[in-house]
Amino acid sequence: MKIAIVVPAHNEEKRIGVMLERYIHYFNDAHSKTSLSCEFIVVLNGCVDNTYIVVERLQKQFTNIRLINLSESGKGLAVATGFKDALMRDNDLIGFVDADMATSPEYFYDLITQIADYDGIIASRYMEGSVVTPVRPWIKTWGRKIFYHGLIRLLFGMRYKDLQCGAKLFKRSVIQKVAPQLMVKQWAFDAELLYLCKRAGFKIKEVPTVWHDQAGSKLKIMGSGLPMLKSLFRIRFNHSIFSKN
């Protein structure tokens, strides 16, 4: 089985080196024990630090790293670009994981072992059985429950516990279908991705995970609410009967 893991990276010079080394060693070890083969597609987006140099150095050491450098920033843009690149080769499963290693490699591997007959599988920080350290501030918890999830149910009819966890995996057929339709370049792209899966009738499984919140998160509580709100309404319009798309 061949797997592609997209790693979106925006100014991650301090974290991505350790993350890639741990992931590559873990999956190379899995390859030595199973038929699993994994490539890592690192998509830099709008980096102005030394992330490129760090990844390029590792690319000379590990043959299963692919490096794409985009001048424009946007996690959604980076993931969509990585998806399209992964489809150029015969990957069976295609997913993405955050560069900060909030999801350790063994917990991403859990997604592979549990996908079974589902079309996709997403890690959840909020399901029963999940472990999140350190404990999240109350404003994140209640903001998610009262505002974000309520709006998601209203606009898209989706009831996932956690849409935005940065660890998701899909079968090739899913990415072939939805990748050309992805439009959101920033943080709300998770909602668009899962909504497109819902519209296409794909079965997506949500499973509890272990998550370690990392310092230096790119998504800030204050200041991100209004842009996120606009993005959600834009997604609903872009994929409605009123849109030409």
Image (cartoon, rainbow, N blue to C red):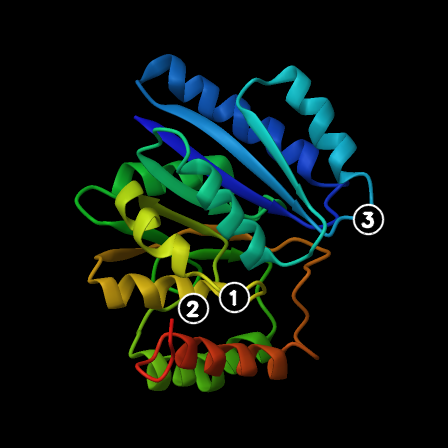
- Contact? badges 3 and 1 (CB < 8 Å): no
Q: In terms of depth relative to the viewer, which is nearer, 223 or 241?
A: 241
Q: Is residue 112 above or below residue 175?
A: above
| Mark sitting earlier along the chain (2/3) | 3
Q: What x and y, as percent, mark residue 43?
A: 61, 42
* Residue at (49, 25) in percent of width and height: 26
Distance between the Cα atoms at labels 3 and 1? 22 Å
Q: Nearer the viewer, residue 23 or 86?
A: 86
Callout 2 touching callout 1 (CB < 8 Å): yes
Which residue does the image show at 61% across and 44% down from the upper left? 99
Q: Residue 236 placed where, x, y %?
A: 40, 79
Local crowd at mark 2 within 10 Å, few (<14), some, or many (≥20)? many
State left or right for residue 212 relative to residue 243: right
Q: Quadrant of the N terminus?
A: top left
Kindly give the residue lying farthest to the top in the view shown: 32
Task: Give the answer, above or below, for where 21 lies relative to 229.
Answer: above
Residue 191 numbered tag: 2
Residue 77, given in percent of the width and then of the height, sits at: 56, 56
Q: At numbered mark 3, what does the secondary structure look like: helix, strand or loop?
A: loop
Q: In this rendered view, identify the residue nearer to me: 32 or 61.
A: 61
- The numbered disc on residue 184 is 1
Please indicate, yes or no, whether residue 178 appears anywhere in the rendered image: yes
Position of the C terminus, as image quadrant, is bottom left
- Which residue is labeled 3 in the image? 48
Question: Is 213 left, or right, of 118 in this rendering?
Answer: right
Which quadrant holds residue 37? Answer: top left
Residue located 44% across and 75% down the image: 235
| Structural distance between the alpha carbons of marks 2 and 1 | 9 Å
Label 3: how many Cα within 10 Å (few below 14, some 14–19, many 20+): few
Q: Dot 1: what SS?
A: loop
**Neighbour class for label 1 at 10 Å: few (<14), some, many (≥20)?**
many
